[in-house]
């Protein structure tokens, strides 16, 4: 059989088909990530639930008097923290996995995207576990829970697509520019404090006439989650539209950039 490179499918389509063919590999990578993360931990999976709770307690103690205008501030902080933890940890791990996985690309064929996809999916499992302490706090703080929670899976899809898209972008940069791996935690810290995670939205709306929020893509995804869980209401069409545009837009851009450069990863180990 003669291979004709001129008849090769577009990289974005080819990589997508490869992910489907190697779906068992992705499952094993997800399983490995989850097992490896808690294998030597005394608390195991319980740490996923205790970690956001502990961070929330510290943040509430430090900032509750400063931002005492927010109703049910512990719930406000915790909803922001679990979404941010999902995004920040999954994208950080994506960088590490791609830098590590690039060494394998010189030896065997693997779908390059499988490392990022498996990392994001493993982090989504942790996100699901972190919902347990969230709902516990909501009950303790007597936050109303209603039918809007039926929309929670759609909000989780937005968080997943946003994280995956950004994971593709940042891991691509990290392969070509190794310093990105060292600089990214600094970027995440700055990004966190410019997002309505600990700081109330009303406060950020007064900074640069609200442009700090408007130019923050994470805000739109987090906003949907908070409206559903914390406000016990259904997001309006504009909120949904902006969140879908941002999350799926970043996913498409990240996927196109990643697949376009994927063939070169093995040369930048």
Image (cartoon, rainbow, N blue to C red):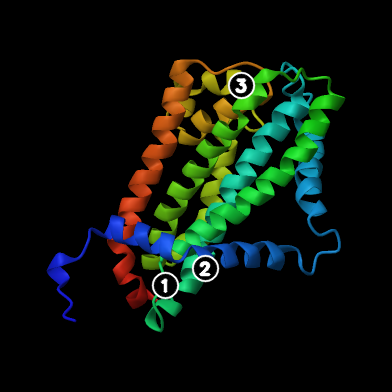
Side (left or right) of 244 relative to 53: left
Side (left or right) of 33 relative to 159: right
Which residue lies at the image location 55% right of the left edge and 24% below the top edge? 204
Q: CA distance from mark 2 to mark 1?
A: 9 Å
- Whichever of labels 2 and 1 marks the residue nearer the N terminus, that label is 2
- Whichever of labels 1 and 3 marks the residue nearer the N terminus, that label is 1
3 and 2 marks in contact (CB < 8 Å):
no
- Residue 139 drawn at (x, y percent): 83, 25
Q: Which mark is residue 110?
A: 1
Which residue lies at the image location 45% right of the left edge and 66% below the top edge? 22
Instruction: For marks 2 and 1, give the one nearer the viewer.
Output: 2
Q: CA distance from mark 1 to mark 3?
A: 40 Å
* Label 1 neighbour load within 10 Å: few <14, some 14-19, many 20+: some
Disc 3 marks which residue? 227
Q: Which quadrant is home to the C terminus?
A: bottom left
- Residue 192 drawn at (x, y percent): 58, 40
Q: Which mark is residue 25?
A: 2
Nearer to the camera, 14 or 87: 14
- Residue 209 drawn at (x, y percent): 45, 18
2 and 1 marks in contact (CB < 8 Å):
yes
Q: Which quadrant is home to the N terminus?
A: bottom left
- Residue 66 drawn at (x, y percent): 74, 24
Q: Relative to 125, does residue 69 appear above or below in the rendering?
A: above
Which residue lies at the image location 82% right of the left edge and 31% below the top edge? 137
Report helix, strand or loop for mark 1. Answer: loop
- Can residue 103 be seen in the rendering of this structure? no
Report helix, strand or loop for mark 2. Answer: helix
Which quadrant of the view contains residue 108?
A: bottom left
Report helix, strand or loop for mark 3. Answer: helix
């Amino acid at each position: 059989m003669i291979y004709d490179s001129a008849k090769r499918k577009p990289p974005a389509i080819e990589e997508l088909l490869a992910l489907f063919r190697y779906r068992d590999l992705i499952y094993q990578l997800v399983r490995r990530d989850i097992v490896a993360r808690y294998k030597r931990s005394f608390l195991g999976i319980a740490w996923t639930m205790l970690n956001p709770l502990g961070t929330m307690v510290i943040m509430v103690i430090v900032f509750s008097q400063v931002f005492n205008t927010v109703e049910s501030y512990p719930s406000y902080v915790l909803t922001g923290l679990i979404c941010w933890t999902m995004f920040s940890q999954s994208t950080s791990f994506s960088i590490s996995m791609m830098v590590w996985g690039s060494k394998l690309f010189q030896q065997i064929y693997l779908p390059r995207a499988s490392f990022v996809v498996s990392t994001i999916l493993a982090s989504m499992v942790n996100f699901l576990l972190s919902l347990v302490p969230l709902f516990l706090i909501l009950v303790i703080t007597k936050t109303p829970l209603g039918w809007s929670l039926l929309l929670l899976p759609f909000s989780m899809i937005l968080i997943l697509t946003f994280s995956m898209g950004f994971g593709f972008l940042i891991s691509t940069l990290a392969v070509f520019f190794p310093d990105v791996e060292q600089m990214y935690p600094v970027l995440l810290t700055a990004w966190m404090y410019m997002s309505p995670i600990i700081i109330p939205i009303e406060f950020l709306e007064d900074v640069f006439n609200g442009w700090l929020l408007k130019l923050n893509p994470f805000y739109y995804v987090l906003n949907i989650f908070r409206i559903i869980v914390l406000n016990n209401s259904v997001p309006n069409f504009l909120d949904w539209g902006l969140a879908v545009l941002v999350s799926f837009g970043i996913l498409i851009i990240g996927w196109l950039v990643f697949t376009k450069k994927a063939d070169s990863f093995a040369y930048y180990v």
